Amino acid sequence: MTTPIFRFAPSPNGYLHLGHALSALLNFDMAQQSGGRFLLRIDDIDQTRCRPAYEAAIYEDLAWLGLEWEEPVWRQSTHLDGYLAALERLDAMGFIYPSFESRAEIARLVAERERAGPWPRDPDGVPLYPGNAKGMPVTEQRRRRDAGDAFALRLDMAAAMALASRRKEPLTWIETGVGPNRETGVILADPAAWGDVILARKDVPASYHLSVVVDDAHQGVTRVVRGQDLFHATGLHRLLQRLLGLPQPVYHHHRLIRDADGRKLSKSSQATGLRELRAAGATPADIRRTVGLAPEGQ
Ligand code: GLU
């Protein structure tokens, strides 16, 4: 049997909270229980939001929790060539196009479309791309890029789905955890729900969706354990894996830790930050208990 490979992949754009602790500890426990490996990945591709101090805090907080990971740590910012190669591949297959609308223009287009009725939203509640950039002539695309205009590189979902569904076996994944509606077992992927998603921007070499599938494949990750908020994104990740010919890990989405008002934790909520809890005298065993995990070694 091959050794299972797990990873915890935080973004250094804030301090870790109890939700991260649950994810990291679950990955670590599952790796130990299955004789697997535990990797740490720093998802720092969006340099506009990441800070070295947050990265240092990640190492400190995870070590305090009692986790050990393999070195060297995989830092996305040092693997940009892999994302570029994946983008070029998708582009060569005709699945990528640039769009040039600003966020404000997109909001205006959505409002315009909504005058005719509800405009579809992705599983995160964000309106699908409403623009017409797919039809822009290549000469015009080139002119705008050469002029230095900001752009996003989008996946042509219709074309990608047409290719993906030419394969006989449906696009699915194996879920050993549970989705937000108790989904488990073999799950049918629904990538089209995301519309023409952004895979890179002028200033960000790869979106989360692209980098996560490329990195999981490069690191040989076989078990992805992460929060339920990423359950529906897995459908999109499966599509990208199929288009790029990458292997599929087994997925395990876990419940989310919520704050006293039932909201998802945010990196700025002090009450649940690991540093704040530590400063207030909490021990790693207290953290395990608070996130509902059995004491270490059980
Ligand atoms: N950096 C991502 C996050 O913190 C990783 C998600 C994943 O595990 O795929 O949400």
Image: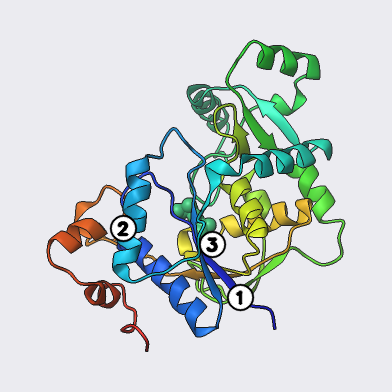
Three-letter code, disc 1: Pro
Whole-angstrom CA distance, mark 1 to mark 2, is 26 Å
Kindly identify which residue carries mark 2.
60
Q: Earlier in the sequence, mark 1 or mark 2?
A: 1
Real-space CA distance between mark 1 and mark 3, rounded to the nearest whole angstrom:
21 Å
> How does the figure colour the protein chain or chains?
rainbow
Q: Tell me if residue 256 can be seen.
A: yes
Residue 120 visible? The answer is: no
Q: Which mark is residue 178?
A: none
Mark 1 element type: loop
Residue 131 vs 264, above or below: the answer is above
Q: Secondary structure at mark 3?
A: loop
Where residue 198 sits in the image (x, y, percent)? 61, 38
Instruction: Give the image location of residue 140, x and y in percent.
Output: 74, 14
Mark 1 sits near ligand 1, with its Cβ under 8 Å away? no
**Farthest-out residue, bottom:** 298
> Disc 1 marks which residue?
4
Q: Residues within 10 Å of mark 3 (few under 14, many from 20)?
A: many
Q: Is residue 280 above or below residue 148?
A: below
Q: Earlier in the sequence, mark 3 or mark 2?
A: 2
Q: How far from the left and from the top, in percent, is residue 153?
A: 66, 32
